Each structure stands twice: as C-alpha cells, then as structure tokens.
Image: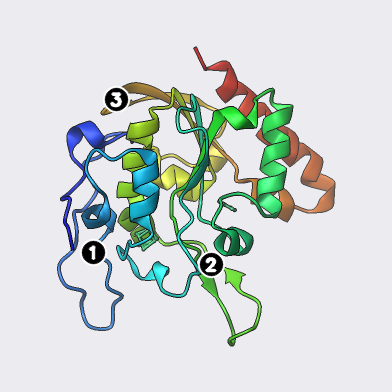
Amino acid sequence: METAGAPGGAREGAPERTSDRGPAGPGRPGRPERPGAAGWVPGGAGVEALREAARGCRGCELWEPATQVVFSAGDVHGRLALVGEQPGDQEDRRGVPFVGPSGRLLQRAVAEAGIDVATTYVTNAVKHFRFTQEAPGKRRVHSSPDVAHVTACRPWLAAELAQVDPEVVVCLGATAARALLPKDFRVTKHRGQLMRLSTSRGEKTFLGTIHPSAVLRVPQEQRDAAYAGLVADLRLAAGALG
Ligand code: URA
Ligand code: SF4
C-alpha cells in the first residue's frame, strides 16, 4: 500500500487542530483496526482523484459492511460547502450523498435560502454508512459514527476542502461540527453563528446548524419552525459569501 503520510500543511483545508491523532499503531485485540485514512489519501490530488482513491480506503472498519464509499457531489469549485454526517441507506446504495429523505429536505432548504444547489459542494464527515442490522436482509438502521470514525475519516475531509477551497463551510449537525469546528461548539448553543476559523488556505467562514434529519425527527407541530431555522441559518451562510 502506498502511504501518503499524515495530511501536510498545504493540503489541509480544514481548520487547524492540534488534537488530531496520527495513524494509530496495530489495532489492540478486540478493537477494530482503525489506522485512519491518511495512508490512503494521495498527496496533492484533485477531488476526482480523491474520490477514486477513497474507494480503497480501509482507514476504519466501516468500509466492510457498507456497499461502497460515498464521497461527495456538487461543484468542486463551489464557494459554499455543505458537510453532513455520513451517508444513509439510500446514499450507500447509490454512492451519492444526500439523495435520501434528509437530502431532499436539504435541497429544498438550500433553494429556499436563495442558494443554487448546483453551485455548492456537498460531502460528509464520514464516508461510509454505519448501521446496525438484526439479521441479513433485515432493515439497516442508521447508527451515528463515533468520534473515532470522524477522526479516522478526517484526512479525506481535510484533503477535499483544501482542494475545493470554499469560502463558507456549513456543518450540518453535531458530527460535522465535531470534525471541523472548535471542540466546545454545541449545535444547541452556537448554531447559526458565523465563525472565522484559520485553515491552511487562510481564514474561512464556518457555520454550524442542525442536521436536516433533525427536522424530520421533531414532532409534527415543531417541524415548520425547525425547518425555518435551518433555512435561516443557510441564508446567513449564503450572505457571508463575498
Ligand atoms: N445524512 C447525511 O449526513 N449525509 C448524507 O449524505 C445523507 C444523510
Ligand atoms: Fe476510510 Fe472513512 Fe470509510 Fe473509514 S469511513 S474506511 S476512514 S473512508
């Protein structure tokens, strides 16, 4: 296997962090093998080459039960990036992010916020679907990624954001926020706040908001308000574009 090493300065498009651990040593007995994605990320590669390379990623154990890697969609020169959590059931089958129920809601919210969705870059913090399943053939139930999965997958996110170099990055939900925003960021407290954060491509604007699936999960009588909140946050992000 070719090793590209840890993501280096100029390739990092995510806010700088000191807490990211490098590739771990051999997995401890009983623990999943989780060396992290860095060894699979080709240095200096464009988004299409990253997408291709991600197919072979074994940076954590999530690749194995999943159908395929789900890398990203949209405009690789997009000025606005939307970062979700991980692919869902439909995304896993189709290999494209945000094509299921939350994706449809997101598209509607983005359009309503006055953003042309075709001009956005859409990706996820974790690139393989994590799920539980009672038995083969049974329904696959979404399971949120752990911090360890977010950490393992982060080299892909860092590399793609460094390439796309968006002006504004929207983190949809706590997992994306965990990948890109300061450690003390809480969606409930800090959503809808524009933040200037330093990245290897200079200072960029970040905003954390709720995940579109949260709109689908709240009781019916709260749904309109939750949706309106998402649209308002997206509008704020769009307004930060220079
Ligand atoms: N939820 C996400 O966070 N990402 C997807 O791609 C689909 C659903
Ligand atoms: Fe690699 Fe990320 Fe998939 Fe884990 S989830 S195997 S780190 S692409």
Give above or below for 135 relative to 73.
below
Nearer the N terminus, badge 1 or badge 3? 1
Question: What residue is shown at x 35% (from left), y 47% (from top)?
Answer: 50
Q: Is residue 118 above or below residue 64?
A: above
Measuring from the top left, give residue 231's x and y in whole percent.
69, 31
Q: Which callout, 2 or 1, points to the residue nearer the camera?
A: 1
- Mark 3 sits on what residue? 201
**Mark 3, secondary structure of its residue:** loop
Rendered image: mark on residue 143: 2
Task: Write down the residue under mark 1.
Answer: 35
Q: What residue type is labelled 3?
A: Arg
SS category of the residue bearing label 1: loop
Question: Which residue is most to the top?
Answer: 242
Q: Which amino acid does label 1 sit on?
A: Pro
Quarter occupied by residue 116: top right
Relative to 33, say whether 221 is above or below. Answer: above
C-alpha separation, residue under disc 2 versus residue under disc 1: 21 Å
